[in-house]
Image (cartoon, helix red, strand yellow):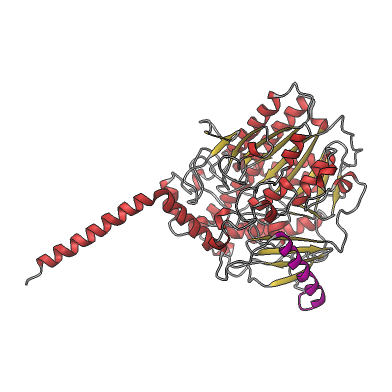
Amino acid sequence: MRARTSGILAGLCLLGSLMATPALLAQQEPAEPAGRPNFVLVLVDDAAYMDFGIYGGEARTPVIDRLARRGVMFSNYHSSPLCAPSRAMLLTGLDNHRTGLATIPEVLPPEHRGQPGYGMDLEPGVVTVADRLQAAGYRTYMTGKWHLGHGEGALPDAHGFDRSFVLDASGADNWDETPYMPYYRTADWFEDGQRTHLPDEFYSSEFLVDRMIDYIDTDAGSDDPFFAYLAFQAIHIPVQAPREFTDNYARTYQAGWETLRQARTLRAINLGLIPESTEAMPLPDTMRAWSDLSAADRELYARSMAVNAGMLEAMDHHLGRLVEHLEATGQFDNTIFIVTSDNGPEPSNPVAELGFTTWMNLHGYSREVQNLGERGSYAFIGPEWAMAAAAPFNLFKFYASEGGLRVPFLVAGPGIEAGRSSGAAGYVTDVTPTILDLAGLSHATEELTGRSLRGVISGEAEIAYQPHEAVGFEVSGNSALFRGDYKLVRNMPPWGDGSWQLFDLSVDPGETRDLAGERPEILASMRADYNVYAATNGVLDLPEDYDIHSQISINAFKRQLEFYGWQFALVLVFGIGLITGGIRWWLSRRPR
């Protein structure tokens, strides 16, 4: 009975989301800010374009859905394909190569180490939106994932944040201070630049909201507005959520990834997020068919996706506590909320990597259906579910296809036209100039890569970019250039072939029809634009044999040698001694 009730509730929740299509969002007059507005910037980790309920996802996200109805939701917003570059662009308004975070340290080839733009910290002179707002009298706070540098001078306290409680790594366990991959020895958390530790009772989404509320309340008597950057760990690997949220999706994903991909594509068309002409690429032949899995594997993977949805719902629930607190303290009506994701869904299958299962065991992780998502468990969705979640687009995180770049984006609050959707192009570098413009600091945006979307979100303008203007992206060879309706894209192995392709996103956002052969003049012109972008921003060519997944393994192994080199050396010496002794013993036993 409980499962049936949960299914009914899930259906009602999804129906509510579907009813809130862009065409049906209630129109409201935008309220004017009482003074300088507060800002809450919410960054979800690895959320796909359709993961929020308002975008047609299965997870219950009533808080995010409510904010979307209060403001403007974008259907054509793009981030970078990888977390740290996206975060650098988000917080600075600059191209990632100009910030020092061209890629992430976990995938950096040795040839790029230390080169300009590839230092893996925010470079000297790079100014964040928090720096600028702080100088203008804003109170500035951050909780969550930083991933823009480690150590003194590289953490939020040195980049404009008055108070911060952050994880400096790409991810970590959501229940305690355990690292999530062999690249890290520990999960390091910092408060105001000093190494600190988590409480015994900890769940990431809950704690990050609690600490943010504490920071805001500490300065409650101030007349100065605040900027709050809330960078959730949800839904990054390891995917983890309390059982009460995961159980809401116990039956949601049992039909498999092909069914989900088809359903999401049709839902996106019905919601008006994409044109009716859209086709979705089928799963690549190298991916597994759901029907080919054993019954046990189907149960495990369906539960993994249920945990993924549960983690999103848990995040939304705790975000709701911040919203309720701001309402109770009279601050909500003067607060602008921006909610987005850093990139598309995570395709990694870590247990397929040599030695990873052993590493999991050594760190107390298990991957069993019975407690999946709970303390001590390790869940992930893998490439097939990531491809399904990225529907109606192609590929996922790491790659420059729409599945890796196009993500949800909404802005809500005073001075913003409510109940509206926009198909205008927007990019991650536009967030900082938009915030500064809304804060009355538009003079500080002149040297930035991005531009303010204020005209679009206020309803005063239809677009922020003219059809002839080109916008480029590059992370670890995965590259894209947008110009009007056209997109030039290159995806590297293993899921791409490294060739340049051309698509008309106005009719083919699924990137199913390569126009490179049909429109050679557009291809050549956009290749020239990309070359200008790459030269202007200091993009380095990759080594010829570079493979991003192999590089992760190599870099993780090198880090393990750094962490445990003397233990490895001791074992090696001991092993050599045993072998040498054995050979000598055997030789001594031979008849002369």
Give the mark count.
0
Is residue 393 visible to us here? no
Predominant secondary structure in magenta?
Answer: helix
Placement of 188 over or under 225, stated as above or below: below
The image quarter in which residue 105 lies: bottom right
Q: Is residue 517 magenta?
A: yes
Q: Picture coordinates of residue 148 (x, y %)?
A: 62, 46
Task: Give the residue displayed 61% in from the left and 54% down from the top.
Answer: 346
Which residue appears farthest toward the front when viewing the image?
Answer: 125
Is residue 152 visible to us here? yes
* 58 or 34, nearer to the observer: 34
Q: Is residue 165 magenta?
A: no
Task: Give the residue displayed 57% in from the left and 71% down from the top.
Answer: 544
Question: If the image is split into quadrants, where does the C terminus sit?
Answer: bottom left
Which residue appears farthest toward the top when viewing the image?
Answer: 221
* 591 or 432, nearer to the observer: 432
* 12 or 509, nearer to the observer: 509
Q: Picture coordinates of residue 81 (x, y %)?
A: 67, 57
* 265 or 50, nearer to the observer: 50
Q: Picture coordinates of residue 129 (x, y %)?
A: 74, 42
Task: Give the residue displayed 69% in from the left and 64% down from the top.
Answer: 479
Q: Magenta part of the protein: which range?
A: 516-537
Left or right placement of residue 268 versus residue 286 in this view? right
Q: Picture coordinates of residue 203 (x, y %)?
A: 57, 36
Placement of 56 over or under 318, stated as above or below: below
